[in-house]
Image: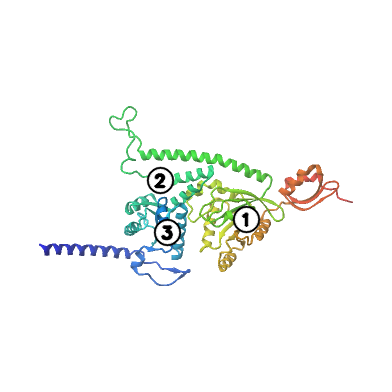
Amino acid sequence: MTSSSSFSQDAQSFTQTYADGRRADALMEEDVAWSHEIDGERDGHQFDRSERAALRRVAGLSTELEDVTEVEYRQLRLERVVLVGVWTSGTSQDAENSLAELAALAETAGALVLDGVIQRRDKPDAATYIGSGKADELRDIVLESGADTVICDGELSPGQLIHLEDVVKVKVIDRTALILDIFAQHAKSREGKAQVALAQMQYMLPRLRGWGQSLSRQMGGGKGGGLATRGPGETKIETDRRRIREKMAKMRREIADMKTGREIKRQERKRHKVPSVAIAGYTNAGKSSLLNRLTGAGVLVENALFATLDPTVRRAETPSGRLYTLADTVGFVRHLPHHLVEAFRSTMEEVGESDLILHVVDGSHPNPEEQLAAVREVIRDVGAIAVPEVVVINKADAADPLTLQRLMRIEPRSIAVSARTGQGIAELRALIDNELPRPSVEIEALVPYTHGKLVARAHTEGEVISEEHTPEGTLLKVRVHEELAADLTPYVPAPTA
């Protein structure tokens, strides 16, 4: 009996080992035709099959604190997360940079990053994003680390979200949901909150799921339902979707009404011919710091992603005395959810309606060129591609000099500054003065002292070349737009014989 039982156990163990080996071999056969790039050059070497198929830990992402008491305190209010990325193209450094940015986003949302893993695939798995075998490995990592949330570095389909959640047994969210959560935390104005709520509902609508049978029961039909309740009725999940669509329609109307107030202000500035400059750029590139440095606006400056959501417009003055407006806009990020681009389109119109874009990029970032490309993609989406652009390489005091040289060589219309130290700010002011559109008409007029408003308009709406006070009035030589030139024409001195 004993030997028969032992033999049965050995056979079962062998069968399990053989099955595991077959499954590992099948996984190893996947994605055999890819090569690794280092610094943009192929190294010509293939990774071992087991290493190719495995999830690879990314070092340096954990934000867990050394002090145990502080960790225990933070656990009361922070989610503990594991990050997951699928590396489909580019170098391994690109993949790690993307996951590091996801870690920064998670921290901004208030999470505690415990671990991060990357898998190399030709494309994300249609069912579970990382494949069923790797999903099982991820479940083990989640159990080992004690995480309660998994964040995927991409936008997951409703099916991927459900299947991966069913395997890992904890909450799963994607990059889009994470960014929406950050926006919801940072929105302060009524319009900002409405735009975020609209984007969240657009994202949530196709991802509604029922727990058990609670959302699939029909509201009507059946015996004993009473009068006016017979018939196929409407399921609970259908009711929820209908209510969300109704709320979305109401939210769009509210945002359209709020947009009118900003358009009136913009038209007022245009009527007074005040040029406008928009500050655009990657999140946390230092846009608000630059606005404060140029205008003394006192806008919130925080070392966090998406600290600024509501556009701030301030008055500024060029070295030659010309007034212009400077608008701080919401920061952009790689793969910015299209729901957000659509919801914040009215806010981003400040960029499209401006006379000049100051495109701020973080010179100390490991890959500033990718930041530039991501921002230009959004600028193109909001229809601001025709607006003149100056690339402002910020944080020059912390940047690698070779990186600065490379950026300034790639971007001919660029300038290196430091909003923190003030380095290059004087040169930037002069550059803005040169780039802003200038009034087209040059005129000389002797304005009586009783018409001081015309002199004031010449200072605010035009460019004063010279000004002299005479017994008859103020002798102005100015460059102004056609409307103001027509008002000054009656005071043009008659030509001397």
The residue lying toward the viewer, choosing from 72 and 349, is: 72
Residue situated furthest top in the rendering: 227
| CA gap, disc 1 and disc 3 | 37 Å
Residue 45 vertical position relative to residue 312 in the rendered view, above or below = below
Whichever of labels 3 and 2 marks the residue nearer the N terminus, that label is: 3
Whichever of labels 1 and 2 marks the residue nearer the N terminus, that label is: 2
- Where residue 38 sits in the image (x, y, percent)? 45, 69
Whichever of labels 1 and 3 marks the residue nearer the N terminus, that label is: 3
- Where residue 448 sits in the image (x, y, percent)? 82, 44
Callout 1, which amino acid? Arg
- Left or right: residue 385 versus residue 125 is right
Residue 161: mark: none
| CA gap, disc 1 and disc 2 | 44 Å
Callout 3, which amino acid? Asp
- Which residue does the numbered mark 3 point to in the structure image? 67
Residue situated furthest right in the rendering: 497
Image coloring type: rainbow
The residue lying toward the viewer, choosing from 109 and 278, is: 109
Residue 132 figure quarter: bottom left
Q: Are marks 1 and 2 in contact (CB under 8 Å)?
A: no
Disc 3 crowd, CA 10 A, few/some/many (<14, 14-19, 20+):
few
- Which residue does the numbered mark 2 point to in the structure image? 206
Q: Is residue 357 visible?
A: no
- Which residue does the numbered mark 1 point to in the structure image? 293
Depth check, mark 3 against mark 2: the one in front is: 3
The residue lying toward the viewer, choosing from 42 and 251, is: 251
Disc 1 crowd, CA 10 A, few/some/many (<14, 14-19, 20+):
some
